[in-house]
Amino acid sequence: MLKTLFDIAVRHLLGRRRQTLTTIFGVAVSTMVLITTNSLTRGLLDSFVETIVNVAPHIRIKGEITNPVPVNILAEGRPHSVAIVEDNIKKLEREEVRNYRQILAVFNSAEYSKQVVAASPYVDSQVMAVKGNRNQPLLLRGIQIERENAISGISKKITSGDGETFEKTPNALLVGRATAREMGLKLNDNITIIPASGISRQCKVAGIFFTGINAVDNSVFVSLKLAQIIEGMPSNKVSGIAIKVADPFNNAPLARNLERITGYRCLTWQEENASILSLFARIGYIVFSLVAFVGVVSGFGVANILVTTVFEKSRDIAIMKSFGFSAAQLVGMFVLEGFIVGLAGAVAGGVLAIGSINIFANLPIESSQGPVTKTGLSMSFNPLYFLLIIGITVLISTLAAILPSARAARLEPVGVLRDSSL
């Protein structure tokens, strides 16, 4: 019986070949657009996470004390007391990690050596860079290049110059490509660095790097010692410590533990990029909403062709019921037609989507995709998203066939045959 119903369903669809192909084409195009859009949004998220995990630190120890000394030292012992302070002058202390070498020694202990892959102390300084008649505020970051290499592989990302020259040249700079383009900097150029202290210093461009992370490519690296001198920091203090861990996706417990033993604020890369990850999540919800909306539109096309089929084949349906076909069997037949149309359109859309994704992924253009910059668009080829969208499309097309099939099941054979011209 199932084969008989399938044969009849195919004949109905082939009987209106042009309308059937048009509906299949509409379903295919909508499926292709949805898969391509989802591939782009998911690809951008995957590219961002991959770039962050490979280049940026997984945990950052900041020079922010987690339990600072309270302003009112009497309040803790006497919670109901009130202290009035007049002419209180406080020293504005900058954020810094003291005795950072002791913290680095902790990472070499048996407890943390397997969890912490690498650690790199750094010093941040806001300076003004001057070259000719151009001046621009810059984030200057002091690093130990051998340690920074273990975090971000910065030496492999130098497009002009090399890390050895940077390490051996006094007052050398590694300039991010975005900053180099804005200031027109080239290899071996001399620029003047003016820190907040006002004491200018001549520096030389020893290399230009490109990581793909816009925030990093807008910064400038110097040696850790030079940054400490510019900031007026002693040799035992830094702004923070960048850490690379063995499991970057399960780093929160380690961050909380390090925060407890060091007394400094420890941020994971997920916390530092929470706003961007939240934005990607919202975009994902919007895309899946479009999947449902466009799928419903495709379902109307499927329902339209089946309503027309029921109208034109009323006499055939009446004859089938006269021969003993039940209402459930007729409903199943038209639902099967909706399934066939939806499946054919969704599969064709999936094939078209593979082509469109490849075209976008191989576009020879460099684009700044939010927080990252790369050549070509980031596209995801995850088969799960293909199957999910194709499945949703087929399901909506199948459900769209229920209304016309119910109408066919309610037809009375006697009334239809009496009103028909035989």
Image: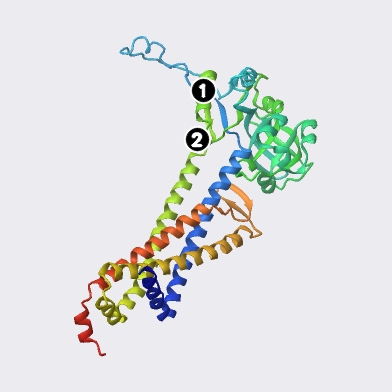
Q: Position of residue 236 (x, y in %)?
A: 65, 18
Q: Is residue 314 left or right of residue 62?
A: left
Of callouts 2 and 1, the N-terminal one? 1
Q: Is residue 137 left or right of residue 312?
A: right
| Disc 1 residue type (three-letter) | Asn
Please name the residue shown 47% across and 67% down the image.
28
Mark 1 is surrounded, within 10 Å at the Cα level, by few (under 14), some (14 to 19) or many (20 or more) other residues, namely few
Give the distance between the C-alpha atoms of the residues marked 2 and 1, in whole angstroms: 16 Å
* Amino acid bearing label 2: Glu
Query: Dividing the picture into quarters, in which one does residue 21 lie?
Result: bottom left
Residue 37, visible in the rendered structure: yes
Looking at the image, how many numbered discs can be counted on the residues?
2
**Quarter assignment of residue 289:** bottom left
Q: What label sits on residue 271 in the rendered view?
A: 2
Question: Which of 64/10 is in front?
Answer: 10
Say which residue label 1 marks.
257
Image quadrant containing the C terminus: bottom left
Task: Work out whether residue 216 or residue 358 is closer to the camera in this orientation and state it.
Answer: 358
Label 1: element kind:
helix
Q: 87 or 398: which is nearer to us?
A: 398
